[in-house]
Amino acid sequence: MKKINVAIIGLGYYQLQAIQKLKKNFNIYGFDQDINAVGKQYVKKFFNIDIKDSLKIYKICKKYRIKKALSFNTEVSLSAVSFINKKLGDKNNNIDLIQNKFKLRNLLKKNFLATPNYSSYKTSHDVNKIGFPLVSKPFYGAGSRGVFLARNKNEFKKLLNENKSFYKDKKILIEQYIPGIEYAVEGWVDDKKEIYIGAISKKKRSKPPKLFDLSLIINYQRPALLKIIKKYLLKLSKILRLFNTVFHLEFKFYKKKIYLIDCSIRGAGYSVYSEILSKIIKQNTDQILIDMFFNKPVKINKSSREIFFLKFIYLKNLKKLKKINKQKVEKLKTFCKIKFYKGINKNSKNKNIRFGHILLSSFDRNLLNKEIKLLNNIIV
């Protein structure tokens, strides 16, 4: 049988497992701005192109009779994928509504889902309407890029100037800071609009003003919270018209209400979707997504009780990690692996750049909690 031509936009390390899986049954035309992208060896034809250049990629797709554009576990290429698939005839496409944080909040408010006081920022009058503390973030983006918490006007001005590279289009969302615990949810909505939750993660962020992800407890076991999330997702999936897709949500839980921070129709990065979630449900999550892309029926396993702890290593942690030579970390009973990211400048003045991560896991929650404390003492 003749293989169908597909485009994959983004060929990095966290897309690799999905690319290898897709290669078995499809001709892959790959696009990445990195000439040395690790996934290029698995594609039929590679194009070294800025993955945000949607029109240029679409013209190539048209030339090579590509039926569908795909991306895996990254926010960056979703807009291009959406644009190309619309041009190729996909009408069930509402990506801008989900990616645009301001539009998303308008929709949540219209449908009576809890939303903090928010506004687009243009003048100091908008800041006065929100009050302090407030959170500022770009309309579009992921990975906490350009996100900060300001506690007064002077701090807001200072931080806005420091983060101006993330606000080039001047589309800035400011919103009331909501306290409470932050969580993430990974899951799927199938072709019958049935919702499957793969894992809930409890997040820990850095102290203000910058709000970096420090760690995640993945497959966090809280049955009462799971019921609340399922009820929320039923309403949200109808509002956003989610169908045959993966989803990644981030939210605060405060005074028994869910306040949505972010929503995306992609798997989480940093191995969470392709590797960790696959272990939790004992099923290849990339294959689930591929089947959904092509409207095939899927059957998703129930989540196991295995819990994972993902701790990010920043440049500022490197000296401490070198000092112990990784031996103390690797001797932990729950140790899985240490991963260092390629292409990171160790000598960068910005010490808040992610350089890698450490992964622990166990079915024993008490043992894992004990070793999380040990790990946090080793790498502050």
Image (spheres, rainbow, N blue to C red):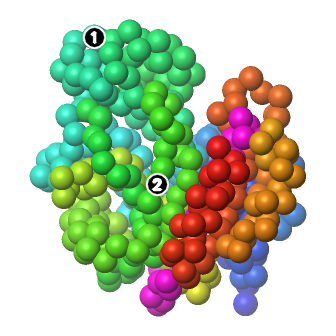
Check if mark 1's residue and mark 2's residue have beta carbons within 8 Å: no
Q: Three-letter amino acid code at disc 1?
A: Ser
Residue occupying the point 38% across, 9% down? 154
| Depicted 152 relative to depicted 256: above or below | above
Is residue 315 highlighted in magenta?
yes
Q: Residues within 10 Å of mark 2 (few under 14, many from 20)?
A: many
| Depicted 311 relative to depicted 105: above or below | below
Q: Three-letter amino acid code at disc 2?
A: Lys
Q: Range of the magenta residues?
A: 295-318
Classify residue 311 as left or right of residue 178. Answer: right
Asked whether residue 286 is in view, the answer is yes
Instruction: Return the x and y of residue 41 as percentages of the image width and height.
Output: 87, 63
Is residue 156 highlighted in magenta?
no
Residue identified by numbered label 2? 203
Instruction: Tell me the number on the disc at residue 272.
Output: none
Of mark 1 and mark 2, the one earlier in the sequence is: 1
Asked whether residue 79 is in view, the answer is no
As rendered, which of 56 and 284 lies closer to the eye? Answer: 284
| Depicted 162 relative to depicted 294: above or below | above
In what quadrant of the picture does the N terminus appear? bottom right
Instruction: Tell me the number on the disc at residue 124.
Output: 1
Residue occupying the point 33% across, 12% down? 153
